[in-house]
Image (cartoon, grey):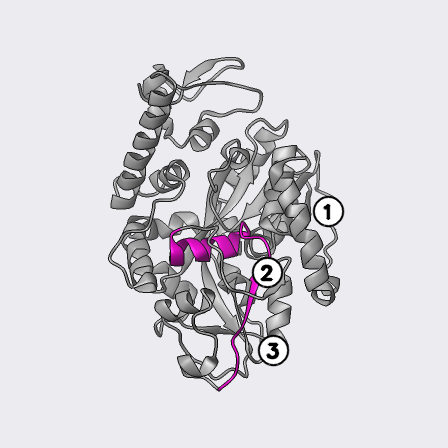
Amino acid sequence: MSVRAVRLLSALLLGACLVAPAVAKTTHHPVHHKTAKSKGPALIWRGDVTTAHGVVTEMAKLWEQEGHGRVELQPFNTASGIDAVAAGTADIAGSARPSDGSPEDSRLTFTPVAWDGLAMITNPANPVRSLTLRQLHEIYFGKITNWKDVGGRDAPIDLYAVISPNDGVEYSLRSLLYGRGDQQISAPRLYLNTKALEEGIALNPNGLGVSTLSNVAGNPKLRTIPIDGVAPTVANIADGSYPLYIPLFLVTNPNSPKAAQTQAFLDFLQTDKAKAVLRDHSVLPYQDGAGLVSMNEARRNKVYGESTASSAKPPLAAPGASYAAAAAVAPTSEHTLAAHAAMERRDADARASTGGATKTYTVVKGDTLSGIAKKQGVTVTDLRDWNHLKNDSIRLGQSLRVSRD
């Protein structure tokens, strides 16, 4: 059993003890969409409930209606989805965070498909109408513990969190506030996934936690709290005025026997019909947010600086994944170039530790040049140049150079 799996099992056992009532309410069963037009082997999707609600559930129905096949949905949390794809028991995972740089994640491809907003949620009875980034930082660190200190009633702040720090939503928020997604926080109320967390806050006037706009839009039992007076809306995410926006990812295994089928599903998300479905669920199609990529460096610096009251810049997480994602929509932006520089420094360090050897990759069944580029954190153009390719055609067993000398 992998180290990640052991951590996840321990978390699940502890979480079951902490939030048994909430878990009982959120038991998920595989969802099978069947129509007369379905064909071919089913794709199995597993992952966080955020990506399920905002991206995959309705997309699976549309995919099937268009005659492409059936998708079996297993919504739970990020770690379970990524582990399942790595182990071959699922074909696609949903994640509200990029690769965390672990060996498990580095063997997978994280494809950004949409933009969502991290939304601080509370009970509608809570009178607090806005929080600053600094206040949010201090609440999660346990330095602010009473609502009266942020303009509310004299009552304790009951902070809720998902038990796994690698949960996509939790990881992304902590990465922005603290510069590291695995930052430990002071949250005594822990839940197995975001859905269970939302149900807990809906019952508690003093509750506070993080979800996403796509998860809670239209839910009368929850209220989002603006950050610095700016509400989490699709319009405010699209123009970058709401600071806590994140990409949503679909995670695939380039070595999977269904690699071609999963790539077809990813390509399907670029169609006009699919983008309309995303917009209907309060998420922004990834390609529509090119401006968010170009402003991401300044945005990260601003959030980190205001949260920590420091002029220091946050560390650039997962440079390979950051570069591949940014290069797809804004190849010349400051953030893309910074990620590329960080990636080159990382690769130089790796070459130094191995005597300067050039990194190579052997093509396996189901590989595509674009899939290899995403997995290695480079661009398709780089691969063509380094390997003197005239087009994107590759052959089984071919050895490709995937790093600079």
Q: Residue at 45% of width from left, 64% of height from top?
A: 141
Q: Which mark is residue 10?
A: none
Q: Nearer the viewer, residue 79 or 278?
A: 79
Residue closest to the far bottom: 153
Q: Read off the magenta span.
A: 154-179
- Rendering coords of residue 6 (x, y %): 66, 42
The disc, 3 or 1, on the residue closer to the chain's N-terminal end is 1
Nearer to us of marks 1 and 2 is 2
Q: Nearer the viewer, residue 276 or 324?
A: 324
Residue 244 in view here = yes
The disc, 2 or 3, on the residue closer to the chain's N-terminal end is 2
Q: Residues within 10 Å of mark 1 (few under 14, many from 20)?
A: some
The secondary element bearing badge 2 is classed as: helix
- Rendering coords of residue 188 (x, y %): 58, 66
Callout 2 amino acid: Thr
Is the N terminus in the top left, top right, bottom left or bottom right quadrant? Answer: top right
Say which quarter of the image contains residue 198. bottom right
Is the C terminus in the top left, top right, bottom left or bottom right quadrant? Answer: top left
- Rendering coords of residue 360 (x, y %): 43, 18
Distance from disc 1 to disc 2, alpha carbons, whole Å, reads: 30 Å
Callout 1 amino acid: Thr
For the residues bearing labels 2 and 3, Cβ distance under 8 angstroms = no
The residue that disc 3 covers is 204
The residue that disc 1 covers is 35
- Rendering coords of residue 323 (x, y %): 35, 38
Q: Residues within 10 Å of mark 2 (few under 14, many from 20)?
A: many
Nearer to us of marks 2 and 3 is 3
Callout 3 amino acid: Asn
Q: Nearer the viewer, residue 127 or 247?
A: 127
The residue that disc 2 covers is 194
